[in-house]
């Protein structure tokens, strides 16, 4: 009986939190990669914990965009927009790396500053 | 949404992605300015309050610690600890030499840098110097020594050559600086094979030293780990008695003021403990990138592609700056309190700085410890990173949402403020004991308290500094 009550409570809480997060508006960001770099204004993606976000990516050359920590990857073809949509469930500052197709696997892949950073701030 | 899911699934299924990840990537958000200012204000106000309380209301003699008889418990625990650590050491060497080159998938980097260097350091400062019961090199020496005696060699393994007096504890100081450079400025410090090679080189060196000069002499002077952990153990509330028959419970920090430092080298060692933890934080921040670009303009010979030389130069410079600041503080104190030489003051207060190093270590590394520590769950099933699954946990991935940034900020700022309070308090107790009158003690601690405030505010500013490598000026990137 006790466990059933606990289960129901958890279920209700989950439902409430789900419903609550569904209300949060989606934040959209654009990263336009040219020669492996993003414009200065697009280098910090700032959201709050719990926000839903959508990143639109374009690039002049094929490659892959990685959001570290969240372990997300988006393959991008040259000139064709790609998208990543996810919920910012964990706070922190996560590097967003660009791996151009012609440089994959090279040791230089993680040298130097990342393309951008995702900042998820606590509420 | 589906697209992200697919991408996420692809990321999980694709070992190539995980392979590319650097070891111990930090996801810390810098603490907001309000935390910094609150922390800094608390530090200044508490310094006055602590000073007042100690000087006006504390007796010069602290209560002695309480010794508790434990019989055969401690020797048994030591035996278990020694066997376990020796097995882990062997496992680490095997993983380093024969396991995968990926730092995330190999047990060695997490075991060495997170569990041992950070985790054990903090555990020792909070509990007691258990390293003496774990040290695998001492275990190897003691075992060989016992066998040699049994085989009829009356003096065992040690040849007991005279250790050069002039050398003192300087080898340990140099080794601590070298180790810190290896840890923070050498990008291959997380490469398992490199770590195993360094461990083998250190094993040969330290066992040779123990054989030449005797284990105790070597560990007192040149064994950087023995000295490092013993210094941290001085903060701890527990200490084992002779022959491991008793354990003494004492006021935390008592060990830092009961016996002052005995040589200049040991003071330099303590200052190196402080400066290296701070440099670690400095190196991951924006300030370092700016400093680096300035230095490389001014002193081009320091520039190399991997930043080895500039890292080494920065590390030594910060150490010398701290040493200079501490020496200056002590000479002002010597001037304020006539009758006491510079050297006795230099020795008296050195250990009271240790809580600052412990606090910054916790503040800087608590999120790493909690994030990267989770990786142990997976590594236990597959220590070599060769697709084993011994306990069915090989696919466990750390939960990056385990601790909220706010919790990390509270812990970090709280630890730094608490460490500062402890340091100021201990310095005042030490002064009260040494200088007899309350007035003299109050005078003698003013310069040191100011130095501690400066150090703590620097620590706070590094915790609050944005760890950005990308929104720094274009000129820095193009350099």
Image: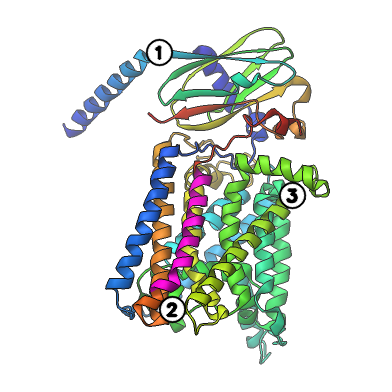
Q: Horizontal and vertical percent for residue B312?
A: 72, 54
Q: Residue at position x 54%, y 13% from top?
A: B3
- Of residue B101 and residue B154, the one placed in the foreground of this image is B101
The residue stretch that appears in magenta? B442-463
Q: Quadrant of the C terminus of chain B?
A: top right
Viewer-proximal residue, B151 or B13?
B13
- With B47 as the anchor, is A56 left or right in this view? right
Image check: B292 left or right of B450? right
Q: Tell which subunit mark 1 falls on.
A: A
Secondary structure at numbered mark 1? loop
- Which residue has dot 2 on it? B258
Q: Which residue is mark 3?
A: B310
Give left or right: position of B241 versus B281. left
Crowdedness near tag 1: few (<14), some (14–19) or many (≥20) residues, C-alpha within 10 Å = few
Chain-order first, disc 3 or disc 2: 2
Q: Tell me which residue sits at (63%, 72%) in the image.
A: B140
């Amino acid at each position: 009986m006790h466990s059933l009550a606990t289960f129901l409570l958890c279920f209700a809480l989950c439902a409430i939190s789900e419903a609550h997060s569904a209300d949060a508006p989606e934040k959209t960001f654009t990263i336009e990669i040219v020669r492996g770099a993003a414009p200065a204004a697009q280098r910090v993606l700032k959201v709050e914990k719990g926000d839903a976000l959508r990143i639109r990516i374009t690039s002049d050359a094929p490659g892959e965009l990685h959001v570290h920590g969240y372990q997300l990857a988006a393959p991008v073809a040259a000139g064709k927009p790609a998208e990543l949509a996810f919920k910012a469930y964990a706070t922190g500052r996560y590097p967003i790396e660009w791996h151009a197709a012609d440089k994959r696997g090279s040791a230089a892949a993680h040298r130097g500053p990342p393309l951008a950073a995702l900042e998820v701030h606590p509420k | 949404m589906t697209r992200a899911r697919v991408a996420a699934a692809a990321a999980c299924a694709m070992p190539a992605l995980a392979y590319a990840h650097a070891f111990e990537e930090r996801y810390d958000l810098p603490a907001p300015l309000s935390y910094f200012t609150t922390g800094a204000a608390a530090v200044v106000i508490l310094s006055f309050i602590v000073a007042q309380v100690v000087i006006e209301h504390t007796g010069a003699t602290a209560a002695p610690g309480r010794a508790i008889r434990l019989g055969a418990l401690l020797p048994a625990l030591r035996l278990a600890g020694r066997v376990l650590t020796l097995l882990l050491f062997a496992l680490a060497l095997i993983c380093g030499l024969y396991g995968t080159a990926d730092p995330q998938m190999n047990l060695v980097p997490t075991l060495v840098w997170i569990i041992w260097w950070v985790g054990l350091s903090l555990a020792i400062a909070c509990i007691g110097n258990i390293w003496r019961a774990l040290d695998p090199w001492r275990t190897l020496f003691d075992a060989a020594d016992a066998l040699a005696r049994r085989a009829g060699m009356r003096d065992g393994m040690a040849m007991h050559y005279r250790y050069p007096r002039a050398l003192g504890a300087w080898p340990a100081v140099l080794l601590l600086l070298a180790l810190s450079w290896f840890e923070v400025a050498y990008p291959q410090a997380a490469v398992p094979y490199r770590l195993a090679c360094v461990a083998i080189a250190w094993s040969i060196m330290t066992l040779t030293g123990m054989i030449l000069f005797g284990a105790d002499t070597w560990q007192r002077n040149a064994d950087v780990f023995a000295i490092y952990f013993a210094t941290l153990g001085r903060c701890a509330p527990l200490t084992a008695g002779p022959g491991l028959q008793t354990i003494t419970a004492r006021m935390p920090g008592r060990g830092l003021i009961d016996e002052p430092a005995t040589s200049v080298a040991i003071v330099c060692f303590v200052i190196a403990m402080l400066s290296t933890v701070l440099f670690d934080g400095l190196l991951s921040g924006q300030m370092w990138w700016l400093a680096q670009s300035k230095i490389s303009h001014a002193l081009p010979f320091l520039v190399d592609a991997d930043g080895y030389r500039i890292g080494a130069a920065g590390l030594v410079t910060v150490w010398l700056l701290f040493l200079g600041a501490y020496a200056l503080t002590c000479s002002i104190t010597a001037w304020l309190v006539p009758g006491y030489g510079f050297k006795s003051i230099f020795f008296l207060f050195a250990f009271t700085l240790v809580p600052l190093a412990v606090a910054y270590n916790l503040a800087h590394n608590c999120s790493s410890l909690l994030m990267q520590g989770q990786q142990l769950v997976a590594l236990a099933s597959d220590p070599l990173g060769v697709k084993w699954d011994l306990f069915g946990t090989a696919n466990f991935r750390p939960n990056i949402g385990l601790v909220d940034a706010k919790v990390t900020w509270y812990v970090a700022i709280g630890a730094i403020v608490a460490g500062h309070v402890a340091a100021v308090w201990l310095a005042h107790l030490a002064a009260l004991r040494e200088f007899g009158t309350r007035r003299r003690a109050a005078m003698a601690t003013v310069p040191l308290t100011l130095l501690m405030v400066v150090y703590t505010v620097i620590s706070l500013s590094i915790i609050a500094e944005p760890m950005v490598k990308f929104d720094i000026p274009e000129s820095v990137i193009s350099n």
